[in-house]
Image (spheres, rainbow, N blue to C red):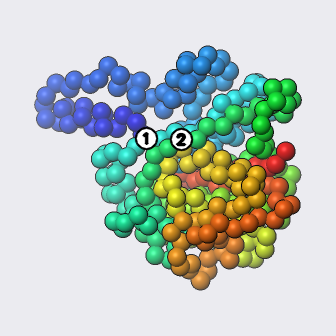
Amino acid sequence: MSGTVDLCGVGISLGSGRPPRPSPYLVPRILPNAAAGAVSMDHGFRGPCLTPSTACAAGAHAIADAALAVAGGEAEVMVVGGAEACVDAVALLSFSKLRALSGRPDSRASRPFDAHRDGFVLGEGAGVLVLESLDHALDRKAAVLGEVRGWGRAGDAHHVTQPDPDGSGAKAAMRSALRCAGLSPEDIAYLNAHATGTPLGDTIEQRAIDEVFGGAGAPSLAVSSTKGATGHLLGAAGAVEAIFALLALRDRVAPPTCNLERLEPEVLKSVVGPSARALPARAAAAMTNSFGFGGVNVSLVLGMV
């Protein structure tokens, strides 16, 4: 969402009848692929250079695209991630008009899955990973965190900002990711949920997870939302949360859902509260969910090597 303030300045000038004086950098700043292009030019990366424009699922989409490029032999190495810098007056006002933001004035406002959640807290950040073939990683003696084992992508075809009440797209993405990875729900030890803290979105995702994983979530499944700690990073969220999931597997610890004080009765029993939870020693696979405006749903399955 970079460049929105500049765009609004041009619009205000036009509306008032004054000649607009846009910055010569306006067009490069508003290009969705500006960050990818800058990284490519700075480091001399000449492989596939692209930017998914899929709202809050973009970081996860980028990981799936990069994994496809490596698996298909299009590249041996891909630098992949997500970045977002939109804590400005325009973005805050716009999301507020959508009634998507929390109205709490304190540091505990970001509270995914909590019975008293009332919206998300806008955050900024970035997460970057290096995806490469295993042979290439071993040849350069890289410290391998894990592997991308599967991905699933699906659309709600329902509403531009609200998820399908049945969670159809979320369920389809999770099931597709499991099929792609060749795993069953019981193989997933940890799930990093999209849960942003909106009353509707968190409930729909809870029900979708419950249906895919069976019962009140698989008995051994740990579910948490790290957005309680980071806020909602929008396009960066999928990449940052993939890193959380990889570290959860490495350290055998499911990160907490910060600020979660009171679960609703129907919430999954597998949701991790405000304290971290140990994962079983055999934990070998994790899933992440990333959903975006426009009905975009992406799930990734990550595993230990």
Q: Is residue 275 visible?
A: yes
Query: Residue 112's spot in the image, x, y percent?
Result: 53, 66
Left or right: 214, with 232 as reference point: right
Amino acid type assigned to the residue bearing label 2 in the image: Ala
Query: Residue 149's spot in the image, x, y percent?
Result: 80, 46
Query: Residue 102's spot in the image, x, y percent?
Result: 39, 64
Left or right: 119, with 214 as reference point: left
The C terminus sits in image quarter: top right
Q: Is residue 262 above or below residue 301?
A: below
Residue 232: mark? none
Query: Residue 285's spot in the image, x, y percent?
Result: 79, 55
Taking the spot 69% from the left edge, 68% from the top edge, the residue there is 277
Residue at the spot of label 2: 126
User: Distance between the Cα atoms at labels 2 and 1?
Assistant: 9 Å
Q: Is residue 293 above or below residue 35?
A: below
Q: Is residue 54 visible?
A: no
Out of 195 and 282, give the one closest to the viewer. Answer: 282
Amino acid type assigned to the residue bearing label 1 in the image: Ala
The N terminus sits in image quarter: top left
Out of 5 and 189, give the one closest to the viewer. Answer: 189
Quarter where residue 109 is shown:
bottom left
Taking the spot 64% from the left edge, 69% from the top edge, the residue there is 272
Left or right: 12, with 140 as reference point: left
Secondary structure beneath label 1: loop
Secondary structure beneath label 2: strand
Residue at the spot of label 1: 85
Q: Earlier in the sequence, mark 2 or mark 1?
A: 1
Taking the spot 48% from the left edge, 41% from the top edge, the residue there is 84
